[in-house]
Image: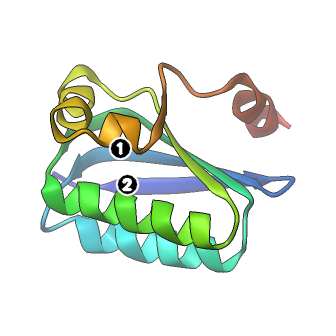
């Protein structure tokens, strides 16, 4: 399955919308998107995972790498709206305590999206 990544930035914050499956084959595309985004220096990134059907350990490592880089820059990276299968992976691996996980995309990012 194809992976689509789109990013909307507003006032130092970025919303990354991911659609599809994150696995060994698609993770490099996601990694390059995060590399590009983090060069812009946002203070906060929210990853909308509401359209992610599957995420394997390679995908989780990409997310962890992005989180580490954001923290090094003094920023924050949150995960929003993971589907049940992805939420289960976060819980089983203990990553739900590493990431801030929101049940839905925070309102301020939806408002920024519409502006």
* 28 vs 53: above or below: below
Q: How crowded is mark 1: few (under 14 residues within 10 Å), some or many (20 or more)?
A: some
Q: In which quarter of the image is residue 28?
A: bottom left
Q: Position of residue 103 (x, y in %)?
A: 47, 19
| Residue drawn at point x = 37 percent, y = 72 percent | 31
Q: Quadrant of residue 52?
A: top left
Taking the image as shown, residue 82 lies to the left or right of residue 35, namely left
Taking the image as shown, residue 30 lies to the left or right of residue 40, namely left
* 2 vs 89: above or below: below
Say what secondary structure mark 2 lies in: strand
Which disc is residue 19 wearing? Answer: 1
Query: Label 2: which residue?
Result: 4
| Residue drawn at point x = 37 percent, y = 54 percent | 4
| Residue drawn at point x = 24 percent, y = 58 percent | 59
Query: Which color scheme did the rendering employ for the protein?
Result: rainbow
* 48 vs 59: above or below: above
Q: Position of residue 65 (x, y in %)?
A: 39, 68
Q: Position of residue 77 (x, y in %)?
A: 56, 51
| Residue drawn at point x = 29 percent, y = 25 percent | 83
């Amino acid at each position: 399955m194809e992976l689509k990544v789109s990013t909307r930035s507003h006032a130092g914050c970025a919303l990354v919308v991911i659609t599809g499956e994150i696995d060994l084959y698609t993770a490099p595309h996601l990694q390059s998107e995060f590399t590009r985004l983090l060069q812009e220096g946002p203070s906060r990134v929210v990853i909308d995972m509401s359209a992610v059907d599957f995420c394997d350990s390679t995908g989780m490592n990409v997310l962890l790498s992005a989180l580490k880089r954001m923290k090094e820059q003094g920023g924050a990276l949150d995960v929003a709206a993971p589907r049940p299968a992805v939420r289960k992976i976060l819980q089983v691996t203990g990553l739900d305590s590493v990431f801030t996980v929101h049940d839905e995309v925070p309102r301020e990012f939806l408002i920024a999206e519409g502006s």
